[in-house]
Amino acid sequence: MAHISIKDLSVEFAIFGANARSLKNTVLAQATGGRVMAGARDIVAVRAIDKLNLEISDGDRIGLVGHNGSGKTTLLRVLAGIYKPVSGSVCIEGRVGTLLDPSAGMDPEATGIENIYLRGYILGMSKREIAAQIPDIAAFTDLGDFLELPMKIYSAGMQARLTFAISTALQHDILLIDEGIGAGDAAFQEKAQKRIEGLFARSSIVLLASHSDALIGRFCNRKVQMEQGRPIADLPLIPEPETMNGPA
Amino acid sequence: MAENVHAPEQTLARDVRPGTAAVPVKLITADHLADEAIADLVEGFRKYPIWTRFAFHEIRQRFRRSVLGPFWLTLSMGIMVAAMGLVFSTLFHQDMSSTLPYIAVGLINWGLLTSCINEGTAVFIGNEAYIKNVPLPVSVHFFRMLARNVIIWGFNMAIYLVVLVWFRIVPDWQFLLFIPGFALFLVNAAWMGLAAGILSTRFRDIPQVIANVVQVIFFVTPVFWSPATLSSRPAFIEWNPLYHILELTRAPLLGHDIAPHSWLFALGLAAIGLAGTAYLYRRAYARIAYWV
């Protein structure tokens, strides 16, 4: 059973001053030592997540909202194991799938098929798992023979469809999504919605960071508002009826 | 949508799906981050299906639509070897049949060592988008760089085969020593690349420093010139560890013996280097995603 338990989590960024990152400054700082060091190294720590507590249970589809810099993406990166905390703990039960950059691993020079593999490997799929997904992705994207051509000749809409189709093929217990998951032209939207529903239905827990109330209202059943690295509101949402019909 | 009442069915449904039978539990804390660093290296290495594929992909991609493909690597190196071989054998009145194989093997292996170091400086900086958005072990990017350079080295070794045939060199039993020699050579190239990567990520002057140092060492180290012609060996040869690790791969390929102290130098360098790099990685690991 998937579960996430976050206790007193804090994350800090050390911001190096414009010059503090060069070697000279550290060497000099160490040579002069002591009192001057603090000033010479001007490192500013920014607390991106501040003693955050959150319990997330099986079935939760959380919409993370908040201003830019409120810590949404940082929180997802901690859950993905990318950013290490300075204090506190996170206990995650379940396999985590991450969609922070929907096109990570893809290469415009490579063909559509090659990109399905490249992106699939980055998403943690095996060669066999990817191969099994290809007919589905080909059917969904309607790209046909274009899949044998380099992705750079695709229109922006075609690229978006391919990216979307691969990312939404994930099968994990826990799903971390940052912003843009919707894709493509208006005619494509309907199909895309269905596919997102399928993806959400396969996952036990979803965390979706977004500025789009429509997206969150459509797919989430819980809304967590972040501000300055903390949740300031945690509300249940009543999802629209379609979401209930997913093949769960 | 899945209230607690439905939970049993959900669990059951998931259990049927392959690969999800056991739900893994992961604890993320600020403790033991240094130990996680070593685990990251092990995990990263075990992701070899990913990094070998991406390494091959990068090379294929670089030469896509070119007629020669990756054999451009071979050809470029071949031209370099031939030119230097001609110049040096003419200038110093040396025998082509000994100068050219020496320069070929020296340049090819030196190329592997220095690209590991030079490209090592960018393994983290250059993969910022991956490191920040993809939950792979950070060391995957380092192993990918290593694999890519070993593949390029493989293409360059075609020149060695040409040289063997051209000068009718018949490899004897010493050739077998190339296997342990190359392994030790690679271990040294690897730690140098990783150390360069860690330091460069934290201190952005390091890549420039390294590029310059490597350039100078190329001339100081007997790569394209042979110390055999010198009456006495200056300290910068005898105590140059890079010369000794280069000898591990060069001597067996030319049918020469590897001097015992070259083994010692290379082993010592590997031990010190691995320990030092492990220390660096343990200290830096938790911050790499923040530094890039």
Image: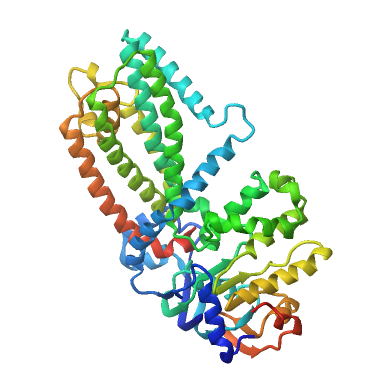
Q: Is residue B187 above or below residue A132?
A: above
Q: Give the x, y percent position of residue A126.
A: 52, 57
Q: Residue at x 41, y 38 (%)?
A: B150
| Of the pair A42 and B191, the residue shown nearer to us | B191
Closer-to-camera residue (A248/A101): A248
Q: Most extreme residue toward the right, as rendered? A: A187
Q: Residue furthest left?
A: B260
Left or right of B93: which side holds B1?
right
Q: Position of residue B170 (x, y in %)?
A: 29, 18
In this view, B177 is above or below A111: above
Image quadrant assignment for residue A172? bottom right
The quadrant where residue B153 appears: top left
In the rendered view, tell whether residue A40 sits above or below residue A213. Answer: above
Q: Quadrant of residue B246?
A: top left
- In front of the other: A81 or A219: A219
Q: Is residue A180 above or below residue A223?
A: above
Percent x, y of residue A96: 52, 71
Residue found farthest to the front: B16
| Camera sees residue B211 | no
Q: Report the residue at 54% width, 76% height from top.
A: B14
